[in-house]
Amino acid sequence: AFFLCMIEKWLDEELLIRTVVENNLVSLLYETHRRHIDRMKHIFLEDTALDAQQADYLAAVLANIIPAALTVWYQHGKTESPEEIYRAVSKSLRIIEKEL
């Protein structure tokens, strides 16, 4: 899964994550993902029937997930594996879908 691959790549950047989280600069991660929003749309929307507006909302949510997950991982003492993060985020999204 692409999301799992992204988590694995980001966890290799532990010093960067620490610096960003400890200095309250997580928005930099979000902005980085937003700069690549067209690529994210292409990857995640390839086989969906979303219109352009719906695709924008999905891409914005996706751009926020990685910075949020990395922040929680760091706050948890960097204890979870990429697979555990993936499962936790997936479960969270299922709960959100059910409750919305």
Image (spheres, grey):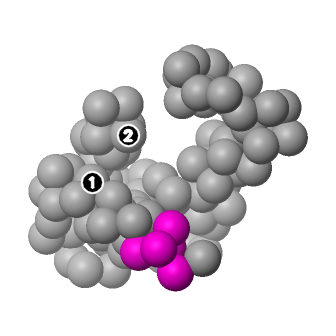
Q: Is residue 77 above or below residue 13?
A: below
The quadrant of the image that shows the N terminus is top left
**Main SS type for the magenta part?**
helix
Residue at the spot x=63%, y=66% of the render? Answer: 25
* Residue 52 or residue 63, whichever sits in front: 52
Residue at 23% of width from left, 59% of height from top? Answer: 87
Farthest-out residue, right = 53
Q: Is residue 77 above or below residue 4?
A: below
- Name the residue carrying label 2: 3
Q: Could you tell me residue 11's position as x and y percent?
A: 28, 48
Cβ–Cβ under 8 Å for marks 2 and 1:
yes
Percent across and percent down for residue 91 are 31, 67
Q: How many marks?
A: 2
Q: CA distance from mark 2 to mark 1?
A: 7 Å
Splitting the image into 4 quarters, where does residue 36 fall? top right
Q: Is residue 38 left or right of residue 75?
A: right
**Magenta-span inclusion, residue 97:** yes
- Answer with left or right where residue 27 lies relative to residue 90: right
Give the residue type that dot 2 points to.
Phe
The stretch in magenta equals 95-99
Q: First in sequence, mark 2 or 1: give its number.
A: 2
Residue 74: quadrant of the picture: bottom left
Specify whether 27 is left or right of 89.
Answer: right
Residue 71 can be seen, yes or no: no
Considering depth in this image, is 75 or 88 the residue closer to the camera? 88
Q: In the rendering, at what x and y percent does residue 18 appear?
A: 39, 65
Amino acid at circle 1: Tyr
State the residue position of label 1: 86
Callout 1 secondary element: helix
Q: Is residue 89 magenta?
A: no
Q: Which mark is residue 39?
A: none
* Residue at the (51%, 57%) spot, across then down: 65
